[in-house]
Amino acid sequence: MSTSMHENSSRLLFLPLATFIILFVLHTLLNFLSKWNKKSIAAIAKKSSLPSLPKLPIIGNLHQLATLTHRTLQSLAQPYGPLVLLHFGNVPVLVVSTAEAAREVMKTHDLVFCTRPHRKMFDILLYDSKEVAGAPYGNYWRQIKSISVLHLLSSKKVQSFGALREEEISMMMEKIRQCCSSLTPVNLTSLFSTLTINIVCRVALGRRYSGGSKLRKALNEFQLLLGFSVLGDYIPWLDFLGRVNGISGRAERVARDIDEILEEVVEERISKKHHDGANGEGQQKDYVDILLWLQRSNAVGFPIDRTLIKALILVSKMKRKIVFLRY
Amino acid sequence: MYKILIHVEVIFCNIIQKVEHEVTNNGYLFQDLFAAGTDTTSAVLGWAMAELLRHPNVMQKLQGELRSVVGDRTQITEEDLSSMHYLKAVVKETLRLHPPLALLLPRESMEDTKVMGYDIASGTQVIVNAWAISRDPSYWNQPHEFQPERFLNSSVDTKGHDFEVIPFGAGRRGCPGRGFALVVGELVIANLVHQFNWEVPGGVAGDQTLDMTESAGLTTYKKFPIVALASPRT
């Protein structure tokens, strides 16, 4: 009863709100149209004479977002040369299409272009962007990146997981041999996916998760949602739409599920350690152990809390899961 | 007047809805990093096997190299990889044609700067089209052809120093997982090709296995699964 009243009242509230917003939009739209072209671009991109794609007021080139793949971006950019400017809502977006221009951005001016755009989804799904891939540039990012590199991705570490990789690969070869003897065609796509997930789980969590598990389901939803951009990232005053269509709610649910799983893994490890009395670096097996050891020994220059541990595991999972991860 | 306003309102609502729909459902341009990160290795493995199945001469040459390094031993180990130059060329060529994150991960500028003579404002997002760059005819001969030989007598590498092929990005935000990714990729391909002969079955599965259509999404997968018949090489 109270829920339905609550729904009604929020609907009642929504209508005038929507009307107000729409009027505001119209007003802004007219404003933009009158000064079109000169002020809007100039304000954002300064005096740059950078070639720029024609855009709509307010939404910029957002209406083209769905069709902007690497292929369409290539043909869009071609007439303009190595650099072209788009706009997603308020946000200027520079598209780089030649090796020379890429070198300028990622080498000559690497430090200037060293941060990541802020995404609302990351805040919900990735512990407030506490992880390595999406964290903004700064001291915090440098510290957590060095933890990942040192304890997970250095060539010494990569080597130390060699036996585990070879074991997983020979199990895959065994499956293929079984297909051979039964003359069944091999679905390589699905074998590759299982293999990479198994390797990452074993490296990061110390155990393998089988097909239908809670983790895999949560991870699928997680990855799907991570792919979503929220309109509010580009047009902040339209952020409420993310609540209306339920995307934020879905994201919060999956974030909770994943948190529970990771909490369980960390908790299990702590009580096991406690029980065994195992200690020190020599015993370390997987990433969770390493992070817990770092936490206990205070080996890095800042405190590591439970949330950070979970954030790093999550990223490493994605990342290594397959590997080419990126930060 | 009132009617006109209502009309305008409806049109505008439609636009907003459409934009919202596109951004949320198809905004893969900006998929996260992560989501991207997760499936990249298995995507590349798929592309590599598809290219090998489409180029039997390359497959044969690769099998020859593997045999010459490990002889009759079945399992190829990580120590064997260092002398397998053609294998490494096959993986590089796969990454050149099919970088799994075709647009890498977006970066953002932290202060006003000048790039190639243009002013770039602080807060500008940057998308690098790594896919377009590694198929650019001004750096690559026959850029759309799968020719691992092009990497054989060349120092060009994917470390992020040679900007004509940057599947792992470059600089401070370049992928630190590159080493891990390459070991897994090379080891899996080596064992698949050394331990088995591969053949494309007839019919739909075969057609789809050789079909190189790309999936939508931040990580560029082969759209159709790769299904092939294996027979042990003794």
Image (tube, coloured by chain):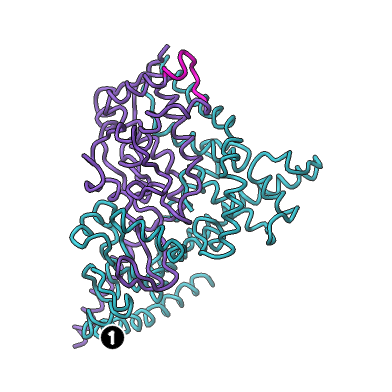
Chain colours: A cyan, B purple
The location of residue A120, given as percent across then percent down, is 47, 65
Q: Quadrant of the C terminus of chain B?
A: top left
Horizontal side of A258 relative to A228 (left or right) equals right
Q: Foreground residue, A56 or B131?
A: B131
The location of residue A43, given as percent across then percent down, is 32, 80
Task: Residue at 35% x, 59% y: name it.
Answer: B127
Question: Which chain hosts label 1?
Answer: A
Q: Foreground residue, A172 or B56?
A: B56
Task: List the residue tagged with mark 1.
Answer: A27
In reply to whether residue B72 is colored magenta, the answer given is yes
Which three-letter amino acid code belongs to the residue tagged 1?
A: His
Q: Is residue A152 above or below residue B78?
A: below
Q: Residue A98 appears in which quarter of the rendering?
A: bottom left
The location of residue A249, given as percent across then percent down, is 49, 62
Q: Secondary structure at mark 1?
A: helix
Task: Residue at 36% x, 55% y: name it.
Answer: B28
Residue B25 visible, this angle: no
Segment colored magenta = B67-77
Q: Main secondary structure of the magenta part?
A: loop
Q: Foreground residue, A291 or B115?
A: B115
